[in-house]
Amino acid sequence: MLKSVLTAVAAVTMIAAAAPASAQDRVRVGVLECDVAGGSGFVFGSTKNLTCIYTPAGEGAKETYTGTINKYGIDIGATDESRLVWGVLAAAQQFDPDALEGNYYGASAEATAGVGLGANALVGGFERSVALNPISLQTQTGINIAAGVAELTLAGTN
C-alpha cells in the first residue's frame, strides 16, 4: 500500500507541473466547495455526483451548483463522501452569476488508505476562461487509488 501512496503522490506532483501556464494571468474571484458522493471505482474510471457552493471573493451572493465528476484512467477501490475545495481563478475580477456553469477538463490523482488526499487540475467554464485553483484540495475516507483524466460538469441551481 505504501508504494501505491507514493505513486499517487508522484502523480499529484505531475498534476501541479501540468497546470496551465495561463492560470498565472488570472485573478482569484472566489472559492468553490463541493461535496462528492461516495462510490466505487470501475478500474478504468468512475462517475460521481456532486453539490457545490461558490463563494465570491468580494461582494455577491453565494451560488449553488450540481454536477458530476468523471474520471478516466486507473480508479480502483471505494470511498465514502468526499470534499473538494478549489480557488476559482478567472481572466477578470468581474465575474457574472452562474459563470461557473459548463464543462472542465484536466488531470486527477488521489490515494486513500483510511483517510486520503487528492488533487484535480481543471480548466473550463465560460469559453474555457476559468481555472479551478488549478490544484484542488480533496479529503475523503475509504480505500482507493486513482490517476487519470477528469471531466467536471457544473449546472447552476439558482
Image (cartoon, rainbow, N blue to C red):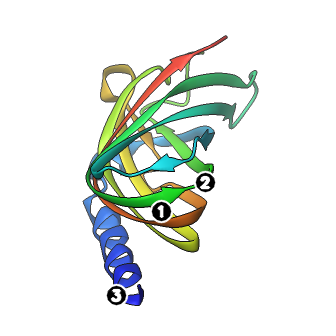
Question: For the residues carrying marks 3 and 2, which lies nearer the camera in this image?
Answer: 2
Residue named by callout 1: 118
Residue named by callout 3: 3
Residue shown at 50% from the left, 54% from the top: 136
Left or right of 113? Residue 111 is left
Q: State which quadrant residue 75 falls in.
A: bottom left
Residue type highlighted by circle 2: Asp
Q: Pointers 2 and 1 in contact (CB under 8 A)?
A: no
Considering the numbered disc 1 on the image, is that residue within a helix, a strand or a loop? strand
Q: Pointers 3 and 2 in contact (CB under 8 A)?
A: no
**The N terminus lies in quadrant:** bottom left
**The C terminus lies in quadrant:** top right
* Precedes in sequence: disc 3 or disc 1: 3
Residue type highlighted by circle 3: Lys
Residue shown at 35% from the left, 64% from the top: 16
* Precedes in sequence: disc 2 or disc 1: 2
Looking at the image, can residue 149 be seen? Answer: no
Q: State which quadrant residue 51 falls in.
A: top right
Spatial CA span between label 3 and label 1: 16 Å
Left or right of 3? Residue 61 is right
Residue shown at 34% from the left, 87% from the top: 3
Q: State which quadrant residue 13 falls in.
A: bottom left
Q: Residues within 10 Å of mark 1 (few under 14, many from 20)?
A: many
